[in-house]
Amino acid sequence: MPEGRCLNSHGKVAGLDELPVTTLKGVGSRNSEKLAKIGVRTVQDILFHLPFRYQDRTRVVPIGSLRPGDSVVVEGEVELADIRFGRRRSLLVRLADGSGALTLRFFHFSAAQKAALRRGSRLRCYGEVRPGPASYEMVHPEYQSLSEGESPAVEECLTPVYPTTEGMHQLSWRAMAGRALALLQANPAALPEWLPESLLQRFRLPDLAAALGYLHRPPPDAPQDRLISGSHPAQQRLAFEELMAHQLSLRETRLRQKRLDAPVLLAQGNLSRPFFARLGFTLTGAQQRVLQEIAQDLAQAHPMMRLVQGDVGSGKTVVAALAALQALEAGHQVALMAPTELLAEQHLRVFRQWLEPLGLEVAWLTGRHKGKQRGQLLEDLAGGRIRIVVGTHALFQSDVAFHALGLVIIDEQHRFGVHQRMALREKGGGSAVPHQLIMTATPIPRTLAMTAYADLDLSIIDELPPGRTPVATVVIPDSRRSEVVERVRSACVAGRQTYWVCTLIEESEALQCQAAEEATRMLQEQLPELRIGLVHGRLKAAEKEAVMAAFKAAELDLLVATTVIEVGVDVPNASLMIIENPERLGLAQLHQLRGRVGRGSVESHCVLMYHPPLSQNAQQRLGVMRETNDGFLIAQKDLELRGPGEVLGTRQTGEMQFRIADLVRDQPLLDEVQDAAQLLLEQFPERVAPLVRRWVGDRQHYINA
C-alpha cells in the first residue's frame, strides 16, 4: 500500500502531513499510541524523525584488522563453543576467518542456541569490538547462521539508529522510514518543496526529498563524523528550513501586533522633569538611548513590544520608571509585574521612593490581598483612581480590571507562562491594547534573541553606571570551609556585610529552607560575635521583608539565604558573597546572585564553594564565572553548555522545541535564515503559511503571545 498513491477526500494527492502513521503497513493502533507520546503522528513526522547515529553493515571486515571500539560485520567459522563458569555463567564462541580470531560472549543463551553454534558452523555477526582476557570480543552480537558456500548480500547503505520510545524496536523504525520514503518517492507532491528554486540556489541548499532520502539511507561512503555532529549539508538543509519557519512565525506575530490599536502616549515632561531634578545621578549614555527608543514606541498608535536587556546593575529600573511616567503624563494607568513577591516588593519600594514625592500613589497587589482590602483596591483600579500598580501574577487574575491601562512593564518575563502575558495584554479596556515593556537582567545571547524573541524590538543597556566595581571570583572546594568562615568574620568585623547562599539540587523548597536553617545554626556557633539573619521562600512576606530591611539598614552583618535573593536586593555595603554548591546552578543564575555584591565602591568578592568531585562540564562553567563579569559572554557560554530551554527558563520554551535545528550548533546559519525569511515574505508570501504549518504546527499559539 505505501508505494501506491494516497488521495484525500477531494481526490487530490494527500499531503504526508495529513496521512496518519497507521497508513504505513505494519503500524497498528498500539504502535501509533506509542509514537504519539513522542509527537510522531503522521507520515511526515516519521520522515522528520532523523537517526542520531549509523551502523556500517555495508561490508564484511577481516577479523585480523579489527580495533577496539569498531562496530562491524564479520564472517567466519566456529572453532569451538564452550560454557565457562566464573562470576557469571557464559557461553564463549571462538570465530576465525583466516586473518584472525574473535571471541563471541553470551551471558543469556539456551541449550538450543549452544547446539546451533557448534564447531564448523559458519556465522555472520554484527557487534562492537572490545578487548577481552585472551582476544578481542563481541558481547551478545547480532548473528545469523550461514549454510556452506552461502554469502548473503551486505546492506547497501549505512544502517540508521533512531531515537526511540519504550516498546518501539529499531527494526520497526527502519521499516516505517523505508515505507515513508517509498510513499514520498511514489507521490513527490505529497511533501511540497516550499523553498523556491532561486532561494535553494542562492543559499546552496539541496532539495527537501533528496536531503531526507540521504539522511535515512546514507551511502556507504557517507562521512559519519559529519552526520553525527549534525553538520552534513542534508541536515543543515532541514535545520535551515525549520529555523526559517520559526523566524517567519515570529515575524507574522510581529506584523499582527503592528495592526492592533494602542493608546498614543506622548511625553509631556510635567512628571519627568521634576523626577530628573530629584534623581541625584545622571543617566548613562546607554540608558538615555534606550529611553529614547521607548519614548518613540509609546508615541505610536500600535503597541510597543520591546525587550530591554541589561546586565546586573545596569540601571533598568530607572528606565522603567521613566517609561511609566510617560504613560502617566498621557493620562493612562501603568502595571508593573514581577515573578516573585520579593522582587515585586523591591520594585514597590523603589517606585514609592521615586514617585510619591511627585504626588503619585503606587498601589500593591499580590495573592495575599483578601476581602475588603482587595475589593477596594480592585474598585479603585477599575475606576481609574489608582494610576500605577506593582504586583505579582495576581495582576492578571480574571477579576482585575483597569480603567485605561496604557503600559505593562514585565520584569524577568521568561519566568512567566505565555498565557499570563496574554492575559495582561487583554486588560487594556475597550479596543486598545496596552504597550508592553519587558525587562530582563539575564542577558540573552544574540542567537536566542534572533530566534526566540524575533517578535520583539530589542534594546540593550550595555554600560554600567560609574562606581560599579567588578566582582573578583574564586572557586574553592568545601573542604576549605573553615577558611571561608574566617574570611566572612574578617569582612564583617571590618564593617562590610556578607551573603551566604545555600543551594540544593532538589526542587523541594522545604529542603532548600532546611539547608539554609542548618547553615544559619552552624554559622551562629562559629561566628557568635556577628548579627546573622535568615531569609528563604517559606517565610511569611512580612518576616522576609523585616529581615531584608534589617540587612539593608546594616542591622545584620551576615544574611543566610536561598536563591530567593537572586534578583531585586540592593545593599551597597555588601561586598562578599559565599555560594555553596554553585555547580548545581546555571551560569545565568550564578551571575544574578553575584550581582548582589559589587554595588558600592569597595572591592567585592564572590566565593564559589563547590563539593568535589566536579564534572568536566561543572569545571568549565565555574571557570567561566572566575574569568569574566560580562553577562552577555556568560549567557553565551550558558547556552552552549546547557541549551536554550535552560537559559530561557523552562516555562516558556514552547517555541524553542526544535525537531532538527540546534541553536548552538546552527548559529552560523541564522544570518542567512533571516535573509531567506525576508525574501520569502517579499517574493513568495503564499508559501509562508504552509512552511510555518509544517514546522511549527499547533505550537503557533505559544508564539502568538
Image (tube, helix red, strand yellow):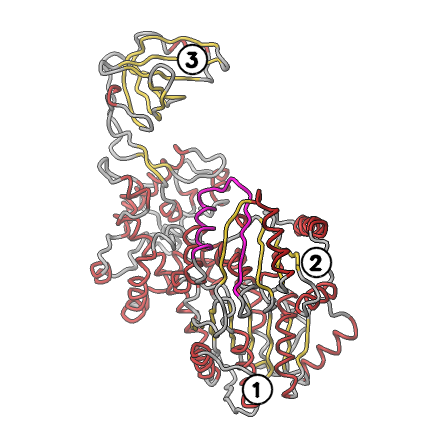
Bounds of the magenta segment: 603-627
Instruction: Please tell me the numbered disc located at residue 275.
Output: 1
Q: CA distance from mark 3 to mark 1?
A: 85 Å
Label 2: which secondary element: loop
Residue 530's tag is: 2
Q: Does residue 510 appear in the picture of this structure?
A: no
Of marks 3 and 1, which one's residue comes earlier in the chain? 3
Report the residue at 58% width, 72% height from top.
424
Q: In front of the other: label 3 or label 2?
A: 2
Residue type at mark 3? Leu
**Where residue 622 sits: x, y (%)?**
47, 51
450 and 273: which is toward the camera: 273
Left or right side of 450 for 379:
right
What type is the residue that disc 2 sits on? Leu
Look at the numbered discs 2 and 1 and tell me whether their residues touch, using CB distance below 8 Å.
no
- Label pair 3/1, CB-CB below 8 angstroms: no
Residue 13 x %, y %: 33, 52
Task: Work out whether 43 lies above or below 687.
Answer: above
Amino acid type of the residue tagged 1 in the rendering: Phe
